[in-house]
């Protein structure tokens, strides 16, 4: 495009739109390149810190010449299934507690007490009860994902403006109508934040369960490669876990942008959406 017409060149428009993504990619390239350079110059032992190139080779071999894809599928299933159970339980119980103050005084203290129990200490008990299969890992994941969703659901449902509730009450709306017309829409941003936290913690929950006792999964693979002193393989699995966590986080963010589209864009950018 000609500058004489006062129009902005297409390449400049494209750069402005994608500059944050380009900066992120550039930061990644500099970080990985610097890591490789430091390992070469200072001759860092691969047992201490493997090169990014060695990690990439391990990833390639694991996916295309090994069984890494199967172990990834196992951990992904445990993460999603556990998150689904924990999130659903948190939503239902949070809804009841927010609606009935008696439950907050009688039930909620026990929920908080359960949450204070370290899940690393709880994992061996669940494995003894449920076995070394995926069910025990799913339940461990559910216990970790449960509380963030529960707490945010309670806060969100109680954040409804009092004037809107009073207006509906003057129009003879019952408790259920107020719940769906006012409380739920007001609570959606809070709930989605809880889901965002819960889905990331679910990855940790699945790995914790696999560390304690498992027959498959990425946590199981970390232990196996650690025993064989394959540090490049361990770092490769950590890369996979990070990518899975980021992918799940972005999925929740995408849902948030579609469901609570009325939220201010500046607020979304502040929270990283």
Image: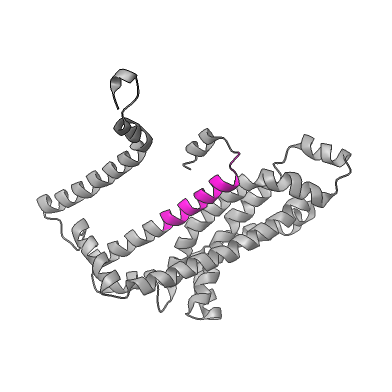
Instruction: Judge whether 219 appears above or below 44 on screen.
Output: below
Instruction: Judge whether 41 appears above or below 86 on screen.
Output: above
Residue 234 sits inside the magenta stretch: no
Quadrant of res 110 = bottom right
Residue 119 location (% of width, % of height): 51, 65
Return the residue nearer the eye: 138 or 126: 138
Task: Decide if residue 14 is in sight here.
Answer: yes
Residue 98 location (% of width, % of height): 73, 51
Instruction: Judge whether 168 appears above or below 209 on screen.
Output: above
Q: Is residue 244 left or right of residue 39?
A: right
Residue 257 sits inside the magenta stretch: yes
Residue 170 location (% of width, % of height): 88, 38
Residue 42 location (% of width, % of height): 11, 51
Return the residue nearer the eye: 143 or 172: 172
Task: Decide if residue 122 is in sight here.
Answer: no
Residue at 46%, 51% (x, y): give it: 250
Residue at 38%, 73% (x, y): give it: 71
Which quadrant does the N terminus fall into?
Answer: top left
Q: Is residue 109 left or right of residue 133?
A: right
Instruction: Judge whether 72 appears above or below 200 on screen.
Output: below
- Classified by dominant secondary structure, the portion drawn in magenta counts as helix
- Which residues are the magenta region? 245-262
Q: Is residue 151 left or right of residue 245?
A: right
């Amino acid at each position: 495009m000609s500058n004489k017409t006062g129009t902005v060149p297409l390449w400049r428009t494209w750069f402005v739109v994608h500059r944050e993504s380009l900066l992120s990619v550039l930061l990644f390239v500099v970080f990985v390149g610097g890591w490789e350079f430091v390992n070469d110059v200072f001759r860092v032992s691969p047992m201490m810190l493997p090169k990014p190139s060695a990690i990439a080779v391990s990833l390639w071999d694991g996916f295309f010449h090994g069984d890494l894809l199967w172990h990834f599928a196992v951990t992904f299933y445990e993460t999603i299934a556990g998150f689904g159970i924990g999130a659903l339980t948190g939503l239902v119980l949070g809804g009841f507690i927010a609606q009935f103050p008696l439950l907050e005084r009688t039930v909620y203290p026990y929920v908080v007490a359960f949450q204070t129990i370290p899940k690393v200490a709880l994992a061996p008990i669940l494995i003894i009860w449920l076995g070394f299969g995926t069910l025990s890992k799913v339940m461990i994941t559910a216990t970790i994902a449960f509380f963030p969703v529960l707490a945010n659901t309670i806060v969100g449902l109680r954040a409804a403006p009092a004037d809107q509730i009073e207006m509906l009450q003057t129009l003879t709306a019952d408790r259920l109508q107020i719940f769906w017309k006012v409380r739920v829409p007001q609570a959606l941003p809070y709930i989605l934040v809880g889901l965002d936290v819960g889905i990331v913690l679910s990855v940790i929950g699945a790995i914790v369960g696999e560390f304690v006792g498992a027959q498959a999964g990425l946590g199981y693979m970390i232990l196996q490669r650690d025993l064989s002193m394959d540090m490049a393989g361990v770092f490769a699995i950590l890369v996979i876990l990070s990518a899975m966590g980021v992918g799940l986080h972005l999925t929740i963010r995408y849902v948030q942008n579609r469901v609570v589209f009325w939220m201010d864009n500046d607020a979304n950018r502040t929270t990283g959406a």
